[in-house]
Amino acid sequence: MPSPSPTNGPTGRLTSELASKFARIALGHVTREYPNKLDHVLDGSGDARGPRDLHPIFFGSFDWHSCVHGYWLLASLLRREPAIPEAAAIRTLFDDAFTPENVAGEVAYLARPSSRGFERPYGWGWLLKLQAELMTHDAPWAATNQPLAAAFAERFRDFLPKASYPIRTGVHSSTAFAIALAQDYAAAAGDAALTALFAEKARAWYLADRDAPAWEPSGDDFLSATLMEAECLRRLLTPGEFAPWLKAFLPRAAQRQPASLFTPATVSDRSDGKIAHLDGLNFSRAWCWREIAATLPPSDPLAAVAEEAAQAHMAASLAHVAGDYMGEHWLASFALLALTAGELIG
């Protein structure tokens, strides 16, 4: 196992120094409008508008969903490390961003007929993950943003009954990732019906899966299709249900098989936006392994193996959250998921 680096501490956990670094990174991009990759359907020439005009809050960070989880990153850091030097700037940013007028603008965009599939399902999950975080703060942000959160929760309610099949990918279309994030909102909001919907669909999609071959990564994965399925079910099954399912799904994991899940991805060109996804894959595997390890009893041999795998994946990518904008506009969010995985909060 690689030795811990000075930047990630002895166990690869969040420090105030790292929180400050991540906050500076996110403050530098959540209001950076260009370059920008829009998910936008033009119904006519009048729809040829810029990001800030289309999205009063989430116009930065290269794309809408990255801006959303950039705000999640900042809110999470503010809660976890409220004394960082960037705290005042974060609060000012949120006060300016989360106004009734701005939220109404984001909601209005969703009402366009051409926006029916906007950011499905990745952005849906991240927006609800953000809302769950905002609800932990003594500030008006969550109440102000609730109409937007409610609109995305309703999209899950409308879409999931029609989704006959899961989307088993390592990119934005992953249904397991979206449901895992959105469940944080359902739990925080006490929305038992939404949780039941997520659980029903996840069971239908994944519960019969056995002996996962883990054919990954593909060349632009930033999620582990295999481990995200496990993490999704971990959040929705009881521990008594999850443990035997995991043993059937990854029966040789304690022996570090399939080997692909224990081998950090190599990133050959971090200036290439798609290849840079592989740093995110390393973080997402670390996140999932740590969450799984925290669920297992200490006597389970997989617990230590999973933590070792998490640290190896963290060590491969933590030094690369900044440096090129293709990774810098999003990677710190995934690093934070991994750094804080398995804790009682977040």
Image (cartoon, helix red, strand yellow):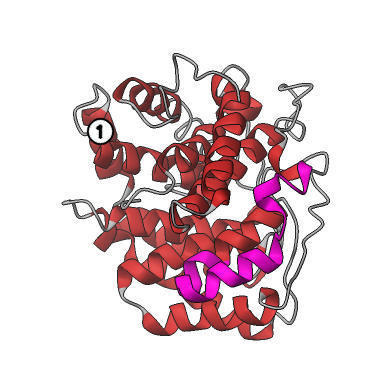
Residue 148 is at least partly visible in this image: no
| Residue at the left extreme of this rendering | 138
Residue 228 rendering spot, x and y as whole percentages = 63, 57
Which stretch did the figure color magenta?
233-259
Q: Label 1: how many residues lie within 10 Å, few (<14), some (14-19) or many (20+)?
A: some
Instruction: Identify the residue at horizontal 65%, vertical 46% (top origin).
Output: 38
Instruction: Judge from the rendering whether residue 156 lies leftward or rightward of residue 173; answer left or right.
Output: left
Judged by its main secondary structure, the magenta piece is helix
> Between residues 42 and 241, which one lies in front from this camera angle?
241
Residue 223 painted magenta = no
Instruction: Identify the residue at horizontal 51%, vertical 35% (top origin).
Output: 335
Instruction: Judge from the rendering whether residue 215 lies leftward or rightward of residue 326; answer left or right.
Output: right
Instruction: Judge from the rendering whether residue 55 lies leftward or rightward of residue 253; answer left or right.
Output: left
Residue kind at label 1, given as amino acid type: Glu
> Between residues 153 and 50, which one lies in front from this camera angle?
153
Quadrant that contains the N terminus: top right
Q: In the figure, residue 162 lies in which quadrant?
A: bottom right
Q: In the figure, residue 177 lies in which quadrant?
A: bottom right
Instruction: Identify the residue at horizontal 70%, vertical 32% (top origin).
Output: 264
Residue 237 painted magenta = yes
**Which residue matches tag 1?**
81
Please, is residue 108 above or below residue 326 in the view?
A: below
Residue 219 rendering spot, x and y as whole percentages = 83, 39
Mark 1 residue element: loop
Residue 224 is at least partly visible in this image: yes
Please, is residue 2 above or below residue 264 in the view?
A: above
